[in-house]
Structure formats: C-alpha cells, structure tokens
Amino acid sequence: MQFIKKTSSRVTILSLITKIALALIIIFGLVFFLSRIDFPAPKKLIEKIIPNENFKIIK
C-alpha cells in the first residue's frame, strides 16, 4: 500500500483566513468594550518637584 497525502491549499488558506478574522474580531471587541468602561479620574493632584540639577543643557 502506498501512502497518499492529501494536500489542498484551499482548505489551508480558508482556515488561515478564518483564524485571522476571528482574532481581529476578538481584538476589536476588547478595544470596544474597554473604551465603553468609564474609569474615574484621580481625585488627588499628583505633583512632583524636580530639582534643577537634573536638567542638562544640550547645545
């Protein structure tokens, strides 16, 4: 008996396109739902004083 391997590029291309489309749908869905969440703004003012010695003048 001979071993016959069925090679079909159409099935491979279709499955690849399906996987890519599914991944894109999931990514866009996550971005959409994360943009819908209303995150509260910070209530405390964040202020940090930077000393002048950390600045370097580049000419």
Image (cartoon, rainbow, N blue to C red):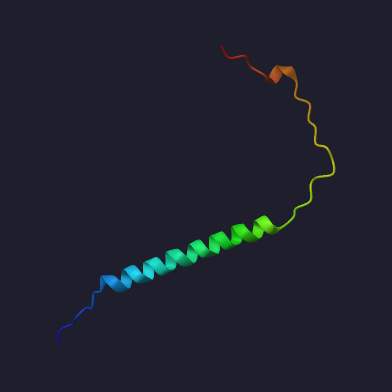
Relative to 57, 13 lies left or right: left
Question: With respect to residue 23, does 5 lie above or below?
Answer: below
Question: With respect to residue 52, does 33 lie above or below?
Answer: below
Q: Quadrant of the C terminus?
A: top right
Residue 50 lies, in percent from the top left, at: 75, 24
Q: Nearer the viewer, residue 23 or 49?
A: 23
Q: Residue at x 80, y 45 (%)?
A: 42
Q: Residue at x 52, y 64 (%)?
A: 25
In the rendered picture of this protein, how many numbered marks are placed on residues? 0
Q: Nearer the viewer, residue 32 or 26?
A: 32
Q: Nearer the viewer, residue 42 or 33?
A: 33
Q: Quadrant of the N terminus?
A: bottom left
Q: To which quarter of the image does residue 45 belong?
A: top right
Relative to 6, 53 lies left or right: right
Relative to 42, 59 lies left or right: left
The furthest residue to the right: 44
The furthest residue to the top: 59
Residue 57 lies, in percent from the top left, at: 62, 14
Relative to 20, 52 lies left or right: right
Question: With respect to residue 13, does 34 lie above or below?
Answer: above
Q: To which quarter of the image does residue 52 belong?
A: top right
The furthest residue to the bottom: 1
The furthest residue to the left: 1
Q: Residue at x 65, y 61 (%)?
A: 33
Residue 23 lies, in percent from the top left, at: 49, 64
Residue 35 lies, in percent from the top left, at: 66, 55
